[in-house]
Image (cartoon, grey):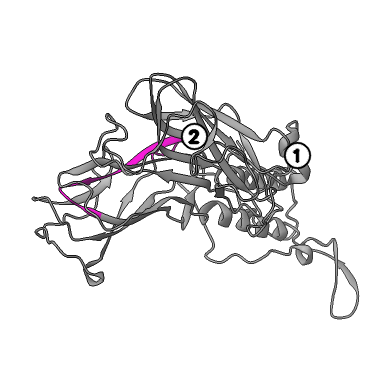
């Protein structure tokens, strides 16, 4: 198959010099521009840069240097993200770890229910760890959907035989080439004398740039508690970092004495400048908003005992009623649940805003009746498709 090169550098493109109908030669005479298709070629190259070299950070988590389990935790963390752009991109899972303080045999970390993992670690357990003992490992994970766009990917990181993680970061890998006919590629026209700029060229560029940019944006927020035993079957007792409530009225998950979103209430601040979307396709008032709105899908991984638990995500106050609710149904050992709507952030507001307009997502939860709910993980992919 033919491939299209993805340029290594991308600087703001100005095609005015290539798109003028006339140019002035050295004698001062105006002459017809011979190859206006060159402007389209420059735009296509810029679009392919955006499509091939826009790796996202999908998940990261740091923890104190304590041994989680001598046998391992399968999984240790859980997380979710969207991968709906057609350009298949592998991931690099980067791990900082320390020598284990418990466990025997071969220790390693890897993707849950997969053979993709770190190299084996066989050093015997030691009782003391120092900064110089920290080591780094990484491994590659193929895209979850292969060549197919996938929504709501659910993955986990597992550890085995005492592998002690300090930090993990999962990021996509940039592309050097994309395959025509398989990837989402902008065909690059060949400039030349007499080459016409046909209508499909700029239309194709617009469609693909929009598709790549609006389906491959990053995460607004994420969180995962630590699954000590490798199972969510006994929530709370095996998971010291789960967020637990018995309240039958909405309270903030970070401070359950707080019950309203204010400028200073605990929440997750999202930096979403330049992530706004214009009226492409139109028809959604919340997205129009002069092209400033950033749409976020909200998901929660949790379990509830005795009755259902409602988890409410509250966005910034630039629009009214900016909230969405997910319901954790009673029973089960833990699963992902989607909110009933999107929340909308404002791309014109900076991260240093100190008012209620700040792009701060407050999360409240409550039991519908007497019982206990456990929130293990949260995910908020920016979503435009």
Q: Nearer the viewer, residue 364 or 152?
A: 364
Q: Which residues fall within the magenta stretch?
A: 144-164
- For label 2, the SS is strand
208 with respect to 152 (left or right) = right
Q: Is residue 163 magenta?
A: yes
Query: Hey, which quadrant is residue 281 in on the image?
Result: top right
Cα distance in 3D space between marks 2 and 1 = 24 Å
Query: Hey, which quadrant is residue 354 in on the image?
Result: bottom right
Q: Nearer the viewer, residue 215 or 167?
A: 167
- Whole-percent x, y for residue 149 in the image: 48, 36
- Whole-percent x, y for residue 182 in the image: 48, 41
Q: Give the label on residue 288, or none.
A: 1
Q: Residue at x 91, y 74 (%)?
A: 29
Residue 302 versus residue 296 in the image, above or below: above
110 with respect to 50 (left or right) = left
- Whole-percent x, y for residue 265 in the image: 59, 47
Residues packed near mark 2 inside 10 Å, few (<14), some (14 to 19) or many (20 plus)? many
291 with respect to 57 (left or right) = right
Instruction: Give the quadrant of the C terminus.
Output: top right
Q: Residue furthest right?
A: 29
Residues packed near mark 1 inside 10 Å, few (<14), some (14 to 19) or many (20 plus)? some
Residue 284 versus residue 185 in the image, above or below: above
- Whole-percent x, y for residue 338 in the image: 50, 29
Q: Residue at x 13, y 61 (%)?
A: 127
Residue 9 versus residue 220 in the image, above or below: below
Q: Give the label on residue 299, or none.
A: 2
Report the mark closest to the observer, 2 or 1: 2
Q: Give the label on residue 338, or none.
A: none
Q: Nearer the viewer, residue 27 or 107?
A: 107
Q: Is residue 260 magenta?
A: no
- For label 1, the SS is helix
Q: Residue at x 56, y 57 (%)?
A: 49
């Amino acid at each position: 198959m033919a491939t299209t090169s993805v340029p290594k550098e991308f600087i703001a493109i100005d095609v005015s010099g290539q798109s003028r109908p006339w140019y002035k030669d050295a004698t001062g005479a105006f002459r017809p521009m011979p190859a206006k298709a060159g402007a389209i070629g420059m735009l296509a190259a810029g679009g392919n840069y955006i499509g091939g070299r826009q790796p996202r950070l999908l998940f990261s988590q740091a923890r104190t240097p304590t041994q989680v389990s001598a046998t391992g935790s399968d999984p240790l963390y859980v997380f979710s993200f969207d991968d709906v752009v057609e350009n298949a991109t592998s991931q690099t899972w980067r791990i900082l770890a320390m020598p284990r303080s418990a466990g025997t045999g071969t220790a390693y970390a890897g993707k849950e229910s997969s053979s993709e993992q770190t190299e084996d670690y066989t050093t015997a357990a030691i009782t003391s760890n120092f900064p110089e003992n920290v080591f780094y490992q990484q491994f590659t994970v193929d895209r979850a959907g292969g060549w197919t766009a996938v929504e709501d990917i659910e993955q986990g990181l597992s550890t085995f035989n005492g592998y002690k993680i300090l930090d993990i970061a999962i990021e996509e890998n940039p592309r050097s080439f994309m395959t025509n006919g398989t990837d989402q590629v902008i065909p690059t026209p060949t400039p030349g004398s007499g080459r016409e700029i046909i209508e499909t060229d700029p239309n194709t560029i617009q469609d693909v740039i929009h598709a790549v940019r609006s389906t491959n944006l990053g995460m607004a927020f994420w969180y995962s508690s630590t699954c000590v035993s490798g199972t969510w079957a006994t929530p709370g007792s095996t998971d010291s970092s789960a967020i637990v409530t018995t309240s039958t009225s909405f309270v903030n998950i970070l401070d359950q004495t707080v019950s309203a979103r204010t400028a200073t209430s605990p929440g997750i601040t999202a930096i979403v400048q330049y992530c706004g979307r214009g009226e492409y396709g139109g028809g959604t008032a919340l997205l129009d908003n002069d092209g400033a709105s950033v749409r976020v899908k909200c998901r929660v991984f949790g379990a509830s005992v005795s009755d259902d638990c409602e988890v409410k995500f509250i966005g910034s106050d630039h629009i009214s009623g900016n909230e969405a609710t997910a319901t954790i149904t009673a029973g089960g050992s833990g699963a992902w649940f989607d909110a009933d709507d999107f929340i909308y952030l404002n791309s014109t507001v900076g991260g240093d805003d100190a008012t209620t307009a700040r792009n701060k997502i407050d999360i409240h939860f409550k039991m519908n009746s007497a019982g206990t709910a456990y929130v293990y993980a949260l995910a908020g992919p920016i979503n435009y498709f």
